Amino acid sequence: MSEKEKKAQEKTDETLTKDVEETQEENVQNSSAETTEASEEKVDEEVKTETEEKKDLTPEEQILSLKQEIEDLKKENADLKDQVLRRVADFDNYRKRMIQEKQEAFDYANTSLLKDLLDSLDNFDRTVDAAQNAQDPKVIADGVKMINKSLVSMLENKYNLVAYGAVGEEFNPDLHEAIGMQEGDVENEQLAAVYLKGYKLKDRVIRHAKVMVVKPSVK
């Protein structure tokens, strides 16, 4: 081989080596999130071994080897890109599914409560129908009281809704909303009248009781 051919061969080898290095760098960057220190050491060892093996190859064989390595790296890079795209698509589908399930949970959160209230509504309808032909108003009143008792029992036992507020209870601004105040013969502020009951859901106040407060007289 002439000196000119040797230089041309070296230039070709240098170009191919540069292509391999650039392809390897691109592949490492695309898969850096999944590459561990152990795998990097393994790759370095394989590259070192391959480099030593290539010393025994002829220039033509080295060129073919480098070309094959480039093709392998391109294929590996394409596979990694495909995996990334698939994971992005899977995550997007998961995110959309979570949003839909969250919206459905919000839309139908009160389904159980509303189904339980239907029985009370049915009883009210029956009471209204019966009132049209009732001769004794007490019968209607007793029917309404029965519905009220059943409704309150269901809300308390099944949903932990508790009513509070009764005349004589000590006034508590955290529980009661005073809409009026008067003086009286009492030692501490207490409820003189309850205009609207308060309600707690478990331990949380969801409606303050609206009350009239009586406070100790100024002496």
Image: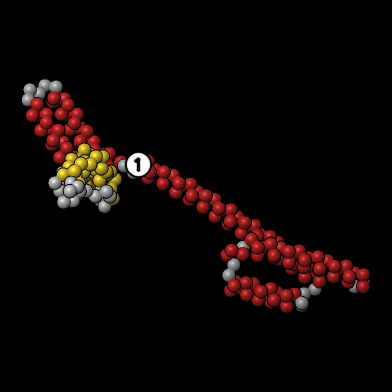
Task: Looking at this view, name the residue that lies furthest to the front.
Answer: 219
The relative height of residue 169 versus residue 33 in the rendered view (above or below) is: above
Q: Where is residue 43 in the image (x, y as percent from the top left)?
A: 64, 72
Q: Is residue 207 above or below residue 133?
A: below
Query: Can residue 69 be seen in this snapshot?
Result: yes
Tell me where residue 48 sits by quadrant: bottom right
Residue ID for mark 1: 108
Q: Quadrant of residue 57?
A: bottom right
Which residue appears at 88% of the width and 71% of the height?
A: 6
Question: Could you tell me if residue 152 is visible in this image?
Answer: no
Residue at 73%, 66% (x, y): give it. 21
Assess disc 1: are there few (<14), some (14-19) or many (≥20) residues with their C-alpha within 10 Å of its C-alpha: few
| Secondary structure of residue under mark 1 | loop
Amino acid type of the residue that numbered disc 1 sits on in the rendered structure: Tyr
Q: Residue 158 versus residue 12: which sits nearer the camera?
A: 158
Q: Would residue 129 be found to the left or right of residue 67 on screen?
A: left
Q: Quadrant of residue 7?
A: bottom right
Q: Position of residue 154 (x, y in %)?
A: 19, 43
| Rendered view: 130 above or below 211 | above
The reply, left or right, for residue 105 in relation to residue 65 is left
Q: Nearer the viewer, residue 124 or 33?
A: 124
Answer left or right for 102 relative to 170.
right
With 73 as the anchor, is 185 left or right in this view? left
Q: How is the image coloured?
A: secondary structure
Q: Position of residue 161 (x, y in %)?
A: 23, 46
